[in-house]
């Protein structure tokens, strides 16, 4: 897991400041906490620090605009990139280290998916 650097939270893909995560209703009625950067990257919040798998799936489907079929056909590091950070939601900061006040750190997972043309071009090579 990549560690945060502290201070103002910035998207790892474009460097823009991002908004604090909020509740989002998924396509199947599930609710997760996250958001979307102006560059198109999405982020999802894992409050417990132990549900990164669920956050990963929620984020990937969210990045694919709710299209589960497309999400399941994508290949990591080919069709999309993922960055994970320790996050302090109370202060809206990316943080160094893995513990705060004796408890596990919350996680924020960023996902950016290549557009359809970029994915097609990569498979044609």
Image (spheres, rainbow, N blue to C red):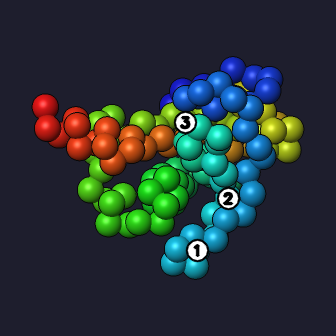
Q: In the rendered image, which quarter is residue 41 located in?
A: top right
- CA gap, disc 3 to disc 1? 22 Å
Q: Residue under label 2, please give it.
A: 33
- Give the tally of numbered discs: 3
Could you tell me which secondary element the residue under label 3 belongs to?
strand
Place of residue 30 in the rendered image (x, y in percent of width and height, measured from the top left): 58, 74
Q: Residues within 10 Å of mark 3 (few under 14, many from 20)?
A: many
Q: Residue under label 1, please give it.
A: 30
- CA gap, disc 3 to disc 2? 15 Å
- CA gap, disc 1 to disc 2? 10 Å
Place of residue 9 in the rendered image (x, y in percent of width and height, measured from the top left): 74, 31
- On the question of residue 115 being in view, the answer is yes
* 39 sits left or right of 68 in the view: right
Q: Residues within 10 Å of mark 2 (few under 14, many from 20)?
A: many
**Could you tell me which residue is drawn at 42 percent across and 36 percent down?**
81
Could you tell me which secondary element the residue under label 1 belongs to?
loop
Residue extending farthest right: 91
* 108 sits left or right of 1 in the view: right
| Above-or-below relation of 80 to 45 | above
Q: Earlier in the sequence, mark 3 or mark 2?
A: 2
* 124 sits left or right of 98 in the view: left
Could you tell me which secondary element the residue under label 2 belongs to?
strand
**Could you tell me which residue is drawn at 66 percent across and 53 percent down?**
34
Q: Check contact, mark 1 vs mark 2: CB within 8 A.
A: no
- On the question of residue 57 being in view, the answer is no
Place of residue 2 in the rendered image (x, y in percent of width and height, measured from the top left): 54, 27
**Could you tell me which residue is drawn at 64 percent across and 71 percent down?**
25
| Above-or-below relation of 18 to 29 | above
**Could you tell me which residue is drawn at 74 percent across and 32 percent down?**
17
Q: Earlier in the sequence, mark 3 or mark 1?
A: 1
């Amino acid at each position: 897991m990549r560690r945060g650097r502290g201070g103002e939270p910035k998207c790892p893909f474009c460097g823009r400041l991002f908004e604090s995560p909020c509740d989002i209703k998924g396509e199947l009625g599930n609710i997760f906490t996250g958001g979307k950067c102006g560059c198109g990257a999405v982020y999802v919040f894992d409050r417990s620090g132990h549900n990164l798998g669920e956050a990963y799936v929620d984020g990937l489907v969210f990045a694919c605009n709710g299209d589960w079929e497309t999400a399941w056909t994508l290949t990591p590091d080919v069709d999309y990139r993922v960055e994970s950070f320790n996050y302090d939601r109370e202060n809206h900061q990316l943080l160094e280290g893995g513990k705060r006040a004796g408890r596990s750190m919350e996680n924020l997972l960023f996902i950016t998916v290549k557009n359809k043309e970029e994915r097609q071009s990569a498979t044609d090579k």
